Image (cartoon, helix red, strand yellow):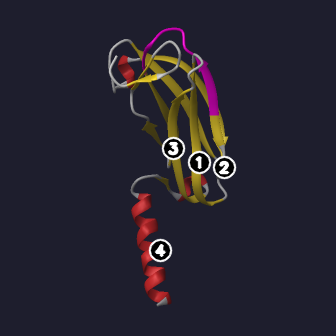
Amino acid sequence: MKKRLAAVICTLLCELCLFSACGGGNGGLFVFLSVRLKGNGDGSISVVAQNEFGLGSAELPVTLQLYRSDGYRTDTRSMEKIKWAHERLGVSQKCEFLYQIKSAGYYCARIEYILNGETKYIQSDTVYYDINGKRISSP
């Protein structure tokens, strides 16, 4: 039974490595990052990057970026970068900021980090927020 449990845990960790920032090059064995946007309904958007889980003691330097466009876009190269922050994230730590909306539009957030010498990205969905910071399904 113990061998089966160990095999299941090892398999799950290997599968998680396929979908996260993994590698020993940053001093940790495994890091799971997330990025999200939240309209606050008061004219602002909360932008958050979080190191959800990690094995090892490494802090991972990340850049959290917020992008905006008038039309729906998923490629940040065709959007305007409007705010960003840099942090070193340890396990369960966050990088976050509040953005006061100046005009309604499509917004997305992106984390940029370096893993084993290669720049990587994790991007949120592109979401339409009105001037009040409310998420609108169809503008």
How much space separates mark 4 and mark 3, taking CA atoms? 22 Å
Front position among marks 2 and 4: 4
Q: Name the kind of residue labelled 2 in the image.
A: Gly
Location of residue 60 in the rendering, given as x and y in whole percent from the top left corner: 61, 46
Quick check: 15 above or below 92? below
Residue under numbered circle 4: 9
Left/right placement of residue 5 relative to residue 70 reads: right
Determine whether the residue tagged by mark 1 lies in a helix, strand or loop.
strand
Rate crowding at label 2 as few (under 14), some (14 to 19) or many (20 or more) other CA atoms within 10 Å: some
Residue under numbered circle 3: 34
Magenta stretch holds residue 16: no
Callouts 1 and 2 close, C-beta under 8 Å: yes
Counting labels gives 4
How much space separates mark 3 and mark 2, taking CA atoms? 13 Å
How much space separates mark 1 and mark 2, taking CA atoms? 7 Å
How much space separates mark 2 and mark 4, taking CA atoms? 23 Å
Determine whether the residue tagged by mark 3 lies in a helix, strand or loop.
strand
Q: Name the kind of residue labelled 3 in the image.
A: Ser
User: In the image shown, does 93 or 37 lie closer to the viewer?
Assistant: 37
Sequence order check, earlier mark of 4 and 1: 4
Callouts 3 and 2 close, C-beta under 8 Å: no
Residue under numbered circle 2: 90
Quarter of the image where one finds residue 106: top left
Label ID, residue 51: 1
Left/right placement of residue 124 relative to residue 99 reads: left
Front position among marks 3 and 2: 3
Seen at 55% across and 14% down, the residue is 101
Magenta stretch holds residue 105: yes
Question: What is the chief secondary structure element of the magenta stretch?
Answer: strand
User: In the image shown, does 74 or 136 lie closer to the viewer?
Assistant: 136
The magenta segment: 96-106
